[in-house]
């Protein structure tokens, strides 16, 4: 009986050791993808003075098409009112986060990737 129990425990440990680095790397790539898309959109919004619907839809399109995020689960909260030069524009992107451990017996950390950005508007109207 103890031999069977030891084999099962060894399987769980082996699965964790094999898959955790890959899942952690994938998680870091997802975080970087959200950062990159947010950074590009923030620069564009700074010049236009607001986060237009085109910019927001472009962010969702990029995350969906280029990085395989589920569009329905992407939440973007941004400054949509026209802001003249010197004012600040803010944007927050929230997406679900995948697991970093294959077995859900460890602390997985936060369930979402949330990135915030704030930039000064350059719109002179």
Image (cartoon, rainbow, N blue to C red):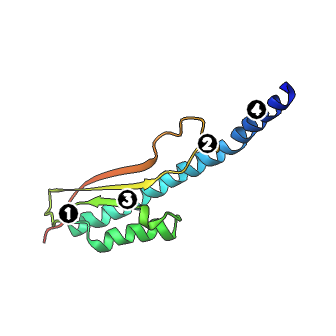
Q: Is residue 23 left or right of residue 39?
A: right
* Separation of marks 2 and 3 at Cα, in angstroms: 27 Å
Task: Point out the residue furthest to the top here.
Answer: 2
Q: Of label 1 and label 4, which has the lower sequence position?
A: 4
Q: As rendered, which of 4 and 62 lies closer to the eye?
A: 4
How packed is label 2: few (under 14 Cα within 10 Å), some, or many (20 or more)? many
What percent of the width, then of the height, locates residue 48?
Answer: 23, 69
The extreme front residue here reads 1
Tell which tag, 4 or 3, sits nearer the viewer: 4
Mark 2 secondary-structure assignment: loop
Q: CA distance from mark 4 to mark 3?
A: 43 Å
The answer to which quarter of the image holds residue 3 is top right
Q: Is residue 64 depicted above or below 28 in this figure?
A: below
Which quadrant holds the C terminus?
bottom left
Residue to which mark 4 is pinned: 9
The x and y percentages for residue 115 are 37, 50
Residue on which disc 1 sits: 122
Q: Residues within 10 Å of mark 3 (few under 14, many from 20)?
A: many
Q: Which is more N-terminal, label 3 or label 1?
A: 3
The disc placed on residue 38 is: 3
């Amino acid at each position: 009986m103890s031999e069977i129990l030891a084999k099962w425990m060894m399987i769980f440990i082996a699965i964790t050791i094999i898959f955790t680095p890959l899942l952690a790397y994938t998680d870091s790539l997802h975080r970087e993808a959200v950062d990159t898309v947010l950074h590009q959109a923030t620069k564009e919004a700074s010049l236009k003075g607001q986060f237009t619907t085109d910019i927001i839809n472009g962010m969702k399109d990029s995350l969906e098409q280029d990085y395989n995020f589920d569009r329905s689960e992407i939440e973007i909260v941004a400054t949509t009112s026209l802001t003249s030069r010197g004012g600040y524009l803010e944007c927050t992107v929230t997406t679900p986060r995948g697991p970093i451990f294959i077995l859900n017996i460890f602390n997985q950390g936060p369930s979402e990737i949330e990135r915030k950005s704030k930039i000064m508007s350059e719109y002179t109207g």
